[in-house]
Amino acid sequence: MPTTTATTDSSAAPMLVNCVAYGDGPPRTIALDDINAALRNPKSFVWVGLHEPDEALLDRLQAEFGLHELAIEDAHRAHQRTKIEAFGDSLFIAVHTAQMAQAKIEVGETHLFLGRNYLVSVRHGASLSYAPARRSCEATPALLALGPSYALYAVLDFIVDNYFPIVDSFQTSLNELEHAILAGDYHRRTITQLYELKKHMVRLLLVMNPLQDILSQLVRLFPGLVRDEVRPYFRDVADHAARITETAATIREMLTSAMDVNLALVGVAQNEAFKRIAGWGLLLTAPMMIASWYGMNFHDMPELAAPHAYPVTIGLTAALCLGLYALLKRAKWL
């Protein structure tokens, strides 16, 4: 069979992205009808990549690889929690992927079937193509010779590494919101953005926490499917996942603190405004009291007859207002 480029997507069948045989010679793209023959070769394994396949295609792969019907059902529905399940001599792994779209995180799913001589990856929703992971494997034939478990590592490593720019984006957004809060930007959109960002971080943690358990199992268990030489690579991915989880948890805590600080500063600003209003109200009370006193129209008020009563009253009122202003200014009410 002629050798072709293994990472070229199939335009004739968009659901079938790649179907490549590795191990016995250079990588070669094969048809679905040739999978059975490729699996009979003990020196090779088959890596099939799918994107949102229909039920007929999944049934076809179930027949070719002997996949468990419950795993096929989960892969078809594409609304699964992050998990790893063993079905005889094969594993079914469901993980969540993520992409940033218009400052929001969109989550997709990838389902992986791992056998002794095959790997099937099924992408749903927001997920980048695994062509870079495939090219990375093909660039290191010695490591690719370790079998499908190394290909599984490449896919999981690619998924986890794609979370780093998302976390960095959230960190940048948090820094911008912190600067806006401390600069006195008390707009409603600030608290809304803080809440939205915290919601995305909680969603990210819900995705990453169970992924660490999956990677831990791949490091320790399944000796017939995961070669010992590959386990250190899974441990490295687990370390990356732990770093992302810790960073996301820290950002979530900082977001909670930022929301509390924003509300506290809003309360302080309101108190300052009320103090100024109360101060000006007290300052205006003195002339209003004197004016109301002289507005009662009593004819027997002794000071009304004095020749300088009006300017003296004006002076005393001004002196009283100036004294109150100085007192309130010193108390920082004005």
Image (cartoon, grey):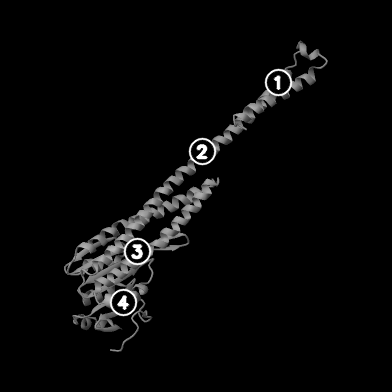
At a point 52% along the width and 37% down the height, the residue shown is: 268
Q: What distance separates the C-alpha of mark 2 from that of mark 4?
A: 60 Å
At a point 60% along the width and 31% down the height, the residue shown is: 333
Name the mark nearer the viewer: 1 or 3. 3
Q: Are marks 3 and 2 in contact (CB under 8 Å)?
A: no
Pick the residue in front: 75 or 274: 274
Q: Secondary structure at mark 3?
A: helix
Query: In terms of sequence position, does the residue under pointer 4 or pointer 3 come before the other?
Result: 4
Give the quarter of the image for residue 154. bottom left
Q: What distance separates the C-alpha of mark 3 from that of mark 2?
A: 41 Å
Mark 1 crowd level (few <14, some 14–19, many ≥20, 10 Å Cα): some
Q: What distance separates the C-alpha of mark 4 from that of mark 3?
A: 20 Å
Q: Position of residue 80 (x, y in %)?
A: 29, 61
Q: Which residue position holds label 4?
A: 140
At a point 69% along the width and 23% down the height, the residue shown is: 320
Q: What distance separates the C-alpha of mark 1 from that of mark 2?
A: 35 Å
Q: Secondary structure at mark 1?
A: helix
Pick the residue in front: 51 or 190: 190
Query: In terms of sequence position, does the residue under pointer 1 or pointer 4 come before the other?
Result: 4
Mark 4 crowd level (few <14, some 14–19, many ≥20, 10 Å Cα): few
